[in-house]
Image (cartoon, rainbow, N blue to C red):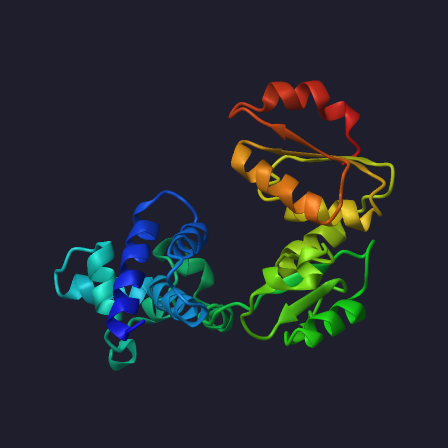
Amino acid sequence: MKPDARIQTAKEIFSLAFNQNLPADRVITTEIKKRRYIGSSDRREISNIIWNVFRNMAKISFLLNAKNVPISADTLFNESLYPLNNHTFPEQVKLECPPCLWEDLKDKTNDLNAMQNEACVNLRINITKTNRNIVTNILLNEGIIANQCNFSPIGLKLLKRCNLQASDAFKKGLVEIQDEGSQIISLMIPAKPKNKIVDLCAGGGGKTLALYDLTLGKTDITACDVANQRLKQLIKRAKRANFNNIKTHLLSNDYEPWLSLNSQSFTW
């Protein structure tokens, strides 16, 4: 694709992600996949252009406000095409910190600075099926370099973007995409085999799957959420890992009756 075509496509997808009440990453991934004419290198570049706007939202909005220009998907995107390092911003804006959090976070500039960079992708090893050394070698043979996570003993971090879904390690259910923080939360829960566990806010099921794996698949786990689409994603992930005994339950917005009826039957 020519540069102008990339920018136009990125602008169209950004506008959809900006205006829909859905997670931006899901919208962007879906919309890029829809455009089958886009090659892999163009996909990466278009994605980079879009995320550049989201990562610099406070700075771009600051410039638009200074010019009395209304903030919209179009104006945010257009302003992002100009070098942002040519301007001086207030510290809060430069660090992309929401105004409501600045008082609590203004003394944590190192943490805020670290969040300005794109996060690396973390993987959780399914320890009932493999170990980190085996997965590291499988990925390396496929040209994917992964290092051990700093804190999680079951985690790997990828050093650069890749098509992980095409990897044997992913397709065979040896690994799951899960950030290191969520892995640590799962490791801190003292669940044991034969426990009965409920995850009341399971979402896509990352921690549910981790707990099932950490207890060697010998627990009774019920994953709950108010969004059926998230539970469907959990079931899909569980099937890839061959985790067959995870139950799901779609909660109503008022989950209290179900919880009152079932809470005594769960250990965790």
Q: Position of residue 224 (x, y in %)?
A: 63, 33
Q: Residue at x 72, y 56 (%)?
A: 172
In-front residue for pair 174/183 = 174
In-front residue for pair 11/104 = 11
Give the image quarter of residue 10: bottom left
Determine whether, in the image, residue 233 is placed left or right of residue 109: right
Q: Check the image and name the residue furthest to the bottom.
A: 86
Q: Could you tell me how many numbered marks the image carries?
A: 0
Q: Residue at x 69, y 76 (%)?
A: 140
In-front residue for pair 239/258 = 239
Q: Residue at x 28, y 74 (%)?
A: 3
In-front residue for pair 1/70 = 1
Determine whether, in the image, residue 109 is placed left or right of residue 259: left
Q: Residue at x 30, y 47 (%)?
A: 19
Q: Position of residue 139 (x, y in %)?
A: 69, 71
Q: Quadrant of the N terminus?
A: bottom left
Give the image quarter of residue 52: bottom left
Q: Position of residue 205 (x, y in %)?
A: 63, 44
Q: Position of residue 197 (x, y in %)?
A: 76, 36
Q: Quadrant of the C terminus?
A: top right
Q: Is residue 218 above or below residue 117?
A: above
Q: Check the image and name the residue furthest to the left.
A: 68
Give the image quarter of residue 228: top right
Q: Is residue 50 above or below residue 193?
A: below
Q: Is residue 165 above or below residue 227?
A: below
Determine whether, in the image, residue 32 is placed left or right of residue 149: left
